[in-house]
Amino acid sequence: MRNQFINDLRQLNIQLLKMGAMVQDIIEVSIQALAKQDLEMAKKVYEMDDAIDELELTIEQECMKLLALQQPMAKDLRVVGTIMKIITDLERMGDHAVNIAKITLTIGNEPLIKPLIDIPKMARLSEDMVRKSLDAFMKEDIYLAEEVALDDEAVDELYEAIYSELITMMIENPEIVKQATHLLFIGRYLERIADHATNIGERIIYMVTGERIEIN
Amino acid sequence: MRNQFINDLRQLNIQLLKMGAMVQDIIEVSIQALAKQDLEMAKKVYEMDDAIDELELTIEQECMKLLALQQPMAKDLRVVGTIMKIITDLERMGDHAVNIAKITLTIGNEPLIKPLIDIPKMARLSEDMVRKSLDAFMKEDIYLAEEVALDDEAVDELYEAIYSELITMMIENPEIVKQATHLLFIGRYLERIADHATNIGERIIYMVTGERIEIN
């Protein structure tokens, strides 16, 4: 029974890592599409998101089967619960990438009002947070999980910077209000993506220690 | 065993309804606080959210215990899975209400740039969607679940209207850019709240029919 559980869990972990990689990809592609104003690439984000949604469903069903058939207790139960929560967070990140792609399509070929610097930085940090949080899950490493929360602060600071910059630009030049608002939302979506990675970190700490904390 | 399951499920349903009521309340209070610029009320939203988070955790743990101890199959398994998804959506709605309260606190006592009409309308529609979606869950009523998706379209339309209005206002009067952006985000949060209610509707259809659909 216990061996079967460990075996099933190993399979789940592989799928979870795959989902994590897909989410890192979708974030990257959504921001690349924006930066290059590549509308075909932006459309690809929708397909990528469908694949993520499907994988979430598969993992979720595997988790529920495992719970029902193996009746794990205590920490094992927390591990499965954690996987179920992680996939929800990953899936939401995919949704935010779609939101970004949607805006890229709306902006279309209209020239960008500013060179993108902080937005790609936020994206890279977020991708890294996803990688790190799943790494922390695999290794049950609460210090790594806490590091994710620190990265989140850096993302928040970048968002604040983008926010101030765009507000100032809008006040000085009302013509750009529309696109500036679009970019503001993109910053916000990235900030949300990072929050989801932080949720994953908090979950892992709970999984390992059995104690709930809120890092930020 | 089956009787025990039904009994446990009944307890879960009661808690779920309670959580739904709390979420309707938090949406209402967050928008009332904004409309009245009542900062004390806005602070109350944070406490309300803590209570929602706690109840989510309780329900989640009950669900996992039930899965592990009763090993439900087929539809029973889907019901428990649905509850676990519903509480995640409800919890996220609470988070959005907090986001709204945060903005209300940021605006502080600065006079509102416009009378709030569509925003309270969106809030009321969203609250109604929450109520309706949980009603659909209890009655396993897929038609009611589909109705939630129709309401979501009305919310989306209101958001579009708010968006256009605020963009126009900003272009005409750049001084209000900051607050207009704040209100824009509030519209967006309400729109997200309604999306979560729609997620719940989709889940219920899956629970009842075993088939996945995406309504919007």
Image (cartoon, coloured by chain):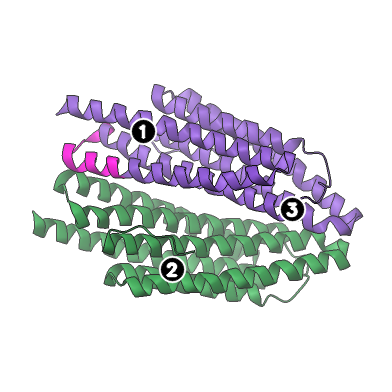
Chain colours: A green, B purple
| Of marks 2 and 3, the one in the foreground | 3
> Can residue B214 be seen from the camera position used here?
no
- According to the picture, the residue beneath numbered tag 3 turns out to be B107
In the image, what residue occupies the spot 34% across and 34% down?
B210
- Secondary structure state at the residue bearing disc 2: helix
Q: In this view, does A70 lie to the left or right of A129?
A: left
- According to the picture, the residue beneath numbered tag 2 turns out to be A130
The chain to which mark 2 is attached is A
- Secondary structure state at the residue bearing disc 1: helix
Residue B8 is covered by the magenta coloring: no
Instruction: Decide: few, some or many residues near mark 2? Use Cα within 10 Å; few <14, some 14-19, many ≥20.
Output: many
- Three-letter residue code for mark 3: Ile
Q: Look at the image and give the residue range highlighted in magenta.
A: B61-75
Of residues A117 and B88, the one drawn nearer to the viewer in this rendering: B88
Q: Which of marks 1 and 3 is nearer the N terminus?
A: 3
- Three-letter residue code for mark 1: Met
The chain to which mark 3 is attached is B
**Quarter assignment of residue A113:** bottom right
Total labels: the figure holds 3
**Quarter assignment of residue A97:** bottom right
